[in-house]
Image (spheres, coloured by chain):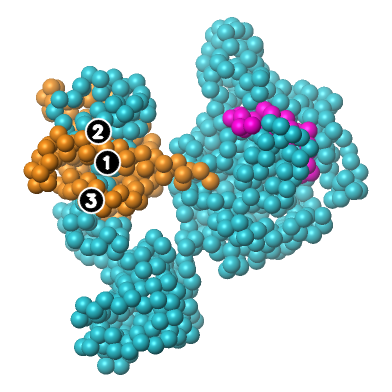
Amino acid sequence: MSPSSHTPANDEAFVQLLSRHEPVVRAYLRGLVSTMEEVDTLMPEVALVAWRKFAELEDRSAFAKWACVIARYEVLRHRRDQARDRLVLDDEVIARLAAEAEEETPQTELQMRALESCLQKLPEDRRKLVLGCYVPGVSIKDIATRTGRSEDGLYQLLRRIRLELQRCVEAVLKKEAAI
Amino acid sequence: MNTNDQELILDYLHGREQINALRLNQLLREDANARAFLRLASAAEVRLRELSLVEGMNRPARKTNVFASWRRPLAAAAAVVLGMSAVWWSQRGIEVQVVQASSSASGEWRDGDNVRLDHVTLASGNVQMRLASGVMLGVTGPAEVKLMDAMHVRLLSGRVTAAVPDSAHGFAVETSAGHVVDLGTRFGVETGTADAVEVHVFEGKVEVVTKQNQLVQLAAGDAAVLDPLRGVAAKMRANESRFVSTTAPSANSHLDNPFVSATFYRNVDYTAAVNAAADRHSGALAQQMRRVAGFPTFVWLDSIAAVHGTNGYSRSLAGHLDEALAQSANAIGIVIYDMPNRDGSALASNGELLIAENGLHRYKTEYIDAIFKTLSQSKYAGLRIVMVIEPDSLPNLITNLNFPRVAEAQRTGTYVQGVQYAIGTLRSLDNTYAYIDVAHAGWLGWENNLKPFAELLKKVGAGIPGGNGKVDGFISNTANYNVFVEPFMKADQKVKARQVRSLRGWYDMNDHIEEQSFANALRTALITGSDAYPASVGLLLDTSRNGWGGPKRPTGPSTSTDLRTFVQETTLDKRTHKGNWGNQSGAGIGERPVANPAPNYDAFVWVKPPGQSDGSSSLIPKGPENPEGKGFDSMCDPTYKGNALNGHTRTGALPNAPVAGRWFQAQFEELVRNAYPPFEP
């Protein structure tokens, strides 16, 4: 399909779908690459390919999964371009992670929503700290310096908070799942 | 996976350098829980990052609604890069749903319409609309309101009211004299003369921030006049009558999965029957029985009388709904089950309405319309009403046309029109959810049945007023005994070169030996191709009687090399034939009701209340034991030698059963004893 066959209505639909599902696709990418920076690099490429192929998508309600499949190919291409020694996860693991994640796109949205309520339950200082660690472009090292902690100590703390959050998300989803 | 493993995964995501990559790969390769943990951690990290951006905007957390206020950067960038600035511009409005417009409202408003607006200008009349945040906004003309986003509107002139659900606390109305910020409430704001603004609080609290940065809290019953120059100029009593009333929108928006965060109604009559059954025992069994009462079951509306609570029914539909409210439940399950020529291939449950006797008209006007009238009462608007639509009716059209009553239903289009009318009517309410019955794997699993059935369902969907989007999903195994999965064998697994699915008299080349694969195959067929249903359709499974626990439950695959012996020793299902359905001996209660049990599944549910008979073991004449004169089906008779529908085998039914729907103590005992997972004593 040539880009000229895009209609304004299709473009609008595409932007809408992309804006709705972008976090899920980002989460999918994050599960397959080692760093958030790679996600930032790959996401626009995924979006571009998805836009080019948009007319091929028959069932728009399956957008998230469809975009994730596109993302999988972008990840594989990206892995081919990288030096082997920079790849942490091997091909088989990547294949399993990808296949399972594509089936679970609705779950990802629920997880993200649950995370938000769990975050609200954290004491203010921990909430601020954990959010501070994920501001784009800010390194853990910077924050350690700024807050007068050792880098290692900050990692330990962050790990504890993340585990706490993750357990809370699981509990929330389990509770939601129980009728 | 232990904590060390979890920490290893987090360290990897945090980009720590000295991690044990060998161990990480091994862990992720072998342990599905570890992979799930990594996925969750990835989703969490993406979300944390988004939230860190919002937090960076330095707004009080309480007022932050990221869904409403956070503009996802890439889509915006995409719009620009793709040269779509015009498109993006036209997106600047916000999505609203028109809930109600008065006939005097100027302009074109149609109730139920979803429209994108960036402002509302109303010369007269009033309009109520729901914003994406769940806020119900009422505008009374003459008025001009700018819709900034789903959490923020600007009142230029006129009157607005807002009913704000918990999820949208922090919703703000901006005026020339200051902001009104919701703290969980219903309130009204009116612009008056000389730029003065009145704020009236009907429920809860609001915070007013004046132009002078005065901060004033107003509680229910309070009102204040805000002056752009002087701040709060006067306080008085709130006057709700001046404002168009908006109702709390809590349950009004239609959910993708109504089972999530739901508290379902426990049928008081069923609970009483279970407790009475338990009273007849002591010790562990009595304890286990009482646990059954703790789970929700569906209310069967199997006749017109069932809707009204007459003719021997202990309670009307409204009676059950009132009890649900009294229990503070937010959901209830009902079964729509009174199709004309109902159950035309069986006798114990055949219906009261006949096509030849104006049945379809009566079904619509006396049954469905009566249910609608009850459900549409505003006091029930907060209940999610989950409906199982007409068990067995559409499936009968695929395989049972040799039965005259089914053939008549086919010829006249009655089942199809009946289902379309039922869904079209009942789903015109936002708080109802329709799940169409799709029989079970042992009935429609063969491709020859599944394909035409999918086509039929698509045809039905396309003819529903409002479209097939009104269908929320499909339910399999209603009141049946099939297992969700066969854990110890697969359909195409071979035993001495013969596939499991080939076993004659049991699977008979069925593609699906379990409900999960059957229902997913059907769902896939339904969401693809022409007249496809939206992929948001979810599945339900009735697990009320598919437990098959007890001492005879296999704990692994058989070692036999004889196919029949292998399957008999390996399958969980201990029936003599898949076509057997009456009060099956050896069955147990299955998985407890739960939301999101598996991919594509909205829930496991107990539609059939365990312990209610499928039909009597012998003919019981109309009388005290059979007030409605229900029929007798020999499939419930343990001495019957069977027919073509069950491969001419014994029925496997328990003896001495009462008529359909009546309490069957002996069966209940067995279902509890054989429950899987077992009930704790």
Does B128 sit above or below residue B250?
A: below
What range of the chain is rendered magenta?
A: B660-681
- Residue type (three-letter) at the residue carrying disc 3: Asp
Q: Are marks 2 and 3 on the same chain?
A: no
Q: Residue at x 64, y 39 (%)?
A: B291
- Residue type (three-letter) at the residue carrying disc 2: Leu
Could you say whether the residue bearing mark 3 is in a helix, strand or loop? Answer: helix
Q: Which mark is residue A161?
A: 1
Looking at the rendered image, the quarter that the N terminus of chain B falls into is top left
Q: Residue at x 25, y 58 (%)?
A: B70
Label 3 belongs to which residue? A125
Rate crowding at label 3 as few (under 14), some (14 to 19) or many (20 or more) other CA atoms within 10 Å: few
- Residue B661, image x and y in percent? 76, 44
Q: Are marks 1 and 2 on the same chain?
A: no
- Residue type (three-letter) at the residue carrying disc 1: Ile
Could you say whether the residue bearing mark 1 is in a helix, strand or loop? Answer: helix
Magenta stretch: includes residue B668: yes
Give the chain coloured cyan: B
Distance from disc 2 to disc 3, alpha carbons, whole Å, reads 21 Å
Query: Is any part of residue B531 visible from this angle?
Result: no
Label 2 belongs to which residue? B10
Res. A86 image quadrant? top left
Distance from disc 1 to disc 2, alpha carbons, whole Å, reads 11 Å
The subunit letter for the residue under badge 1 reads: A
The subunit letter for the residue under badge 2 reads: B
Distance from disc 1 to disc 3, alpha carbons, whole Å, reads 11 Å
Res. A169 image quadrant? top left
Q: Colour of chain A?
A: orange
A38 sits to left or right of B356: left
A156 or B611: which is nearer to us?
A156
Q: If you read the primary sequence from the N terminus, does the residue marked by circle 1 or circle 3 appear first?
A: 3
Q: Nearer the viewer, mark 2 or mark 3?
A: 3
